[in-house]
Structures are given as C-alpha cells and as structure tokens.
Image (cartoon, grey):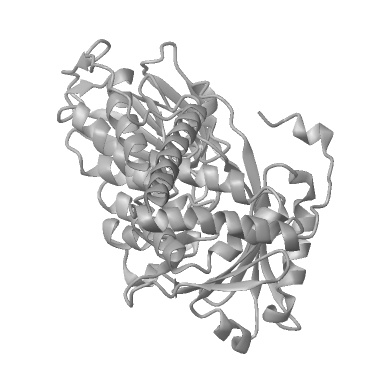
C-alpha cells in the first residue's frame, strides 16, 4: 500500500511537472504572457485632448470581432466610430459553431441559432464510431449558425447604436508615426455601383478585424503566421436524411480526410456543411474534401445538391505583434483561432469586445489617447490570462492526437469516456479549461496509454505525401 501511494504521488508530481513544462514551452511559442508580471503602466505617449471634436476610431472588418468592437465604441462618449466592411452581405466560409456561453454573453436572439447540437459522432480512421454528448444537461447545446445571419445581426446592432457603416475595401493604412494619426485609403462601394470610389479618411485609433489576410496587420508589420486552408461545401440533402442531422454533428479523423486536422458534417438551417482543412498539405485540399464526401456519402443520400463551395485561410497561431502604436488586432487578424477544434467565432467576438472596452476605458471619456504599452497591459494581458490556457491545451492535443492514424484511433477511443466528454464539453461550452480531479486525471493518464497502444495496433499506416515547394512557405 505504501509503495502504491508513493508511486501515485510520483506520477502526480511527474504529470504536474510535465504539464508545467509543456505549458511554458507552448506559451513561449505562442507569444502569450500567462503568469507574467504586467509591465508597469506608462503614460508616455499619451495625449490629453482638447480638440473640440470626438476621438476618431476606425474598425476595419465587419465580422464578429469588428462588429462587437464597433458596438462598444458606438456606446462610448466622445468617440466617433466608423465600421468598414467590404461586403455587407458577406458569407464567410465557416463551420458556424458557437458555444452556449456566447448566446447569453452577447445577447443573441434564439433565431440566430439554426440548430442546437446535443450529440456528436466521432468516426476514427478504421470507421469506429463513438457517440458523444451523454454528459450534457437538458439545456446545454452547441449552437450552429450561418455566418451571413450572425454577422449581419451583430453588425446591424452596432450601427443602430451609432457606428457609421462604410461599404468599402480598405487598401492601405498610412502613418508617419506609429502613434498616428492614421490615414485609411479605401474603395467605397455605393448602392448600385459596381466600381469603387477611391476615398480616404484620418483616424486616431484603429482596430484591425479584417481577417486572416489582414491589411491592417500588414500595415503595422504584425508578422506572419502559419495558416490552414479550410474547404467546405454547403449541401442540400433529402428531408429524411436531414432528420438524422437534426441535433447531431459528425467529426471524422484519418489521414485520408486530413493529415493534421479533422473533417466535419455540421447541420445548418436546411442543409449541411461538409468540409475539412489542413496546414501541412494545402495543395491536396480537394483530395481530402473528396475523401470526406466519400466517407459520409451514405448519410447524405443518393443525390446531394451542392449549394455553395467555400474556402478560406485560418490562422494557426497568434501573430508576433498584436498591438503597435494605437492599432490593435482582434479576431482572425490577430490569430485567435484554436488548434485541435479550429474554433474562432467566440474568440473573435470576445477579443473585439475586450479590446474596445479597454481602449474606451483608457481614453477617459474620450479626453486622451492611450499608449501602445497601456493597450498591451490591459487588452493583451487580460485576453492572454483568460484564454491562454485554452490555446495551450488545444495546441498540445493537436500535436499529440492529429499526427498519425494510431493517435487518431486513440483519440476517438478516449472520447468514449464520460469523464473526457464532460471535461471537453464543459471547457468548450463555458470557455474555461476544466479538470481538477486528481484521481480521474491519473486514471485518464493510464487510459490514454492504453488507448495509444490499442490505436497503434489497429491503425492503418499513414500515406506519405510530398509538397516541397508549398512546405517552404510554412514558418
């Protein structure tokens, strides 16, 4: 008994040290400041104002991050907010899943959520299926949305509160000094006009919410990041087949559908989204899409109708610089998409709101301009402290379980555990890393080892691929 107690203590200590080491390494790699002592707040560069005019704030991008930032600025005193969006009816390629906490936190009406997913099916490379969701409470679900509906609602709300909408493509951000003022040059598209009108405007503060290919990020030399290509087809299927997906989503893993991610079938309003993604072999994305279509073919029926084909880059980690001068990046522009799950909507909305709230507070009622250090010490420090652990855990999970078919088999096998399901869903639904049960954590450690051994025994070998030209583009 004494030896077993000693062994358990050593295992727990080893797990703690290992987790600490992995978290430290990952935090360094991701550029997070978790646990770091905040730098002393400095007023150097701050400007007290008596300009006889409100502060001028530009929000570039009208997705969830930009719309939620614009909403906060529109409510603030002595601030004029302009919201730039190149296409107000834009339909961004996206799975559309949002966590339960987002519905209440961002006061989303019920009609925004097309489907309430309470069941998930995980399918391994060998075809093993594990049903997930039995630990959910009656009122818990994952919300499935269409981005054209969600984005429009958030954007319209910001405009109703006073944000000035501009349908325009931002082409360039110019400034002589990092602290501004900033000149935004853009093409404005007026109703009924196909050709944009060259325009420009000057601003005191900019929030860059213009996605993975952010021109705002390029203007401030925010640094590069690796990105995945996500490919999705929206498919209309027969009503009897749609019934199967009424409150069910599917996740497929295997090197046939992605060498480093997963493929999905997500229910939408009256159709399904079928897609996949990859970082390491982007040129083969069409092959992976064909493979997921083949694996789910029976469930889609004999004559599925492709309504829309979508593809979009997804950042794989945060940019090296997210605040420069009085320009702050949020959402995909900052790199706020999680590994393993590929989730970005909630973190986009949250980062936009958080950045705007901190900047508004720093302006002291629109009477002063904040410094770069002040924005970093508030917005960045708070965001990293709140959500850094989630990014770290999911980054580690992707590196461990999405690397080969043996690990993928183990991943699906582990999902059969009620403890794993509860921790996973609670972490996703409420955006807090769960799991503080030493006994179950030690059991999970041994079960993981068993699942890995079993997975490697039954897994088919991964196919080899080569893309020497494309691979040179990765950091």
- Can see residue 243? yes
- Can see residue 262? no
Question: Where does the image place residue 3, in percent across and percent down from the top left?
Answer: 42, 48
Q: Nearer the viewer, residue 177 or 15?
A: 15
Q: In the rendered view, would you say 235 is above or below 377?
A: below
Q: Nearer the viewer, residue 118 or 50?
A: 118
Q: In the rendered view, would you say 447 is above or below 84?
A: below
Q: Quadrant of residue 474?
A: top right
Question: Where does the image place residue 460, in percent across and percent down from the top left?
Answer: 79, 60
Question: Where does the image place residue 135, in percent across and percent down from the top left?
Answer: 39, 72
Question: Where does the image place residue 382, in percent across and percent down from the top left?
Answer: 30, 35
Residue pictured at 68% horizontal, 79% vertical: 300
Residue pictured at 80% horizontal, 57% vertical: 287
Q: How many marks?
A: 0
Q: Nearer the viewer, residue 277 or 61?
A: 277
Q: In the rendered view, would you say 215 is above or below 373?
A: below
Specify the quadrant that holds the N terminus.
bottom left
Specify the quadrant that holds the C terminus.
top right
Q: Quadrant of residue 270?
A: bottom right
Q: Nearer the viewer, residue 194 or 7?
A: 7
Residue 462 lies left or right of residue 219; in this view the side is right
Residue pictured at 29% horizontal, 46% vertical: 71
Residue 97 lies left or right of residue 294; in this view the side is left
């Amino acid at each position: 008994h004494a030896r077993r107690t000693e062994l358990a203590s050593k295992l727990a200590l080893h797990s703690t040290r290992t987790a600490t080491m992995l978290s430290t390494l990952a935090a360094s790699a991701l550029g997070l400041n978790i646990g770091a002592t905040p730098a002393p707040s400095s007023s150097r560069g701050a400007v007290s104002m008596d300009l006889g005019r409100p502060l001028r704030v530009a929000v570039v991008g009208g997705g969830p991050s930009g719309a939620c930032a614009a909403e906060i600025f529109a409510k603030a005193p002595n601030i004029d907010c302009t919201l730039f969006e190149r296409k107000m009816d834009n339909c961004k390629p996206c799975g559309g899943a949002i966590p339960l906490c987002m519905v209440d936190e961002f006061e989303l009406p019920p009609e925004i959520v097309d489907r309430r997913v309470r069941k998930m099916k995980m399918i391994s490379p060998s075809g093993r299926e594990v049903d997930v969701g039995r630990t959910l409470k009656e009122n818990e679900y994952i919300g499935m949305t269409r981005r054209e509906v969600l984005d429009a609602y958030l954007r319209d709300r910001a405009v109703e509160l006073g944000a000035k909408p501009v349908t325009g493509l931002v082409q360039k951000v110019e400034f002589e000094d990092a602290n501004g003022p900033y000149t935004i040059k853009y093409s404005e598209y007026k109703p009924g006009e196909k050709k944009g009108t060259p325009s420009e405007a000057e601003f005191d503060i900019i929030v860059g919410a213009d996605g993975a290919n952010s021109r705002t990020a390029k203007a401030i030399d925010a640094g590069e990041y690796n990105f995945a290509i996500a490919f999705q087809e929206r498919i209309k299927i027969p009503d009897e087949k749609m019934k199967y997906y009424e409150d069910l989503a599917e996740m497929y893993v295997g090197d046939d559908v992605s060498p480093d991610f997963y493929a999905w079938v997500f229910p939408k309003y009256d159709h399904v989204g079928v897609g996949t993604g990859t970082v390491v072999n982007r040129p083969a994305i069409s092959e992976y899409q064909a493979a997921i279509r083949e694996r789910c073919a029976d469930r889609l029926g004999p004559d599925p109708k492709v309504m829309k084909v979508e593809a979009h880059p997804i950042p794989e980690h945060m940019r090296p610089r997210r605040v420069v001068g009085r320009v702050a990046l949020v959402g995909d522009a900052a790199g706020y998409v999680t590994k393993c799950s590929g989730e970005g909507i909630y973190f986009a909305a949250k980062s936009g709101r958080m950045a705007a709230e901190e900047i508004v507070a720093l302006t002291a009622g629109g009477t002063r301009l904040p410094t770069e250090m002040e924005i970093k010490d508030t917005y960045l420090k708070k965001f990293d402290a709140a959500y850094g652990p989630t990014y770290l855990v999911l980054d580690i999970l992707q590196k461990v379980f999405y690397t080969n078919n043996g690990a993928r088999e183990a991943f699906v096998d582990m999902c059969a555990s009620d403890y794993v399901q509860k921790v996973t869903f609670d972490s996703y639904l409420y955006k807090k890393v769960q799991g503080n049960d030493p006994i179950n954590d030690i059991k999970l450690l041994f079960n993981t080892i068993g699942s890995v051994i079993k997975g490697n025994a039954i897994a088919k070998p991964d196919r080899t691929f080569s893309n020497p030209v494309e691979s040179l583009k990765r950091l």
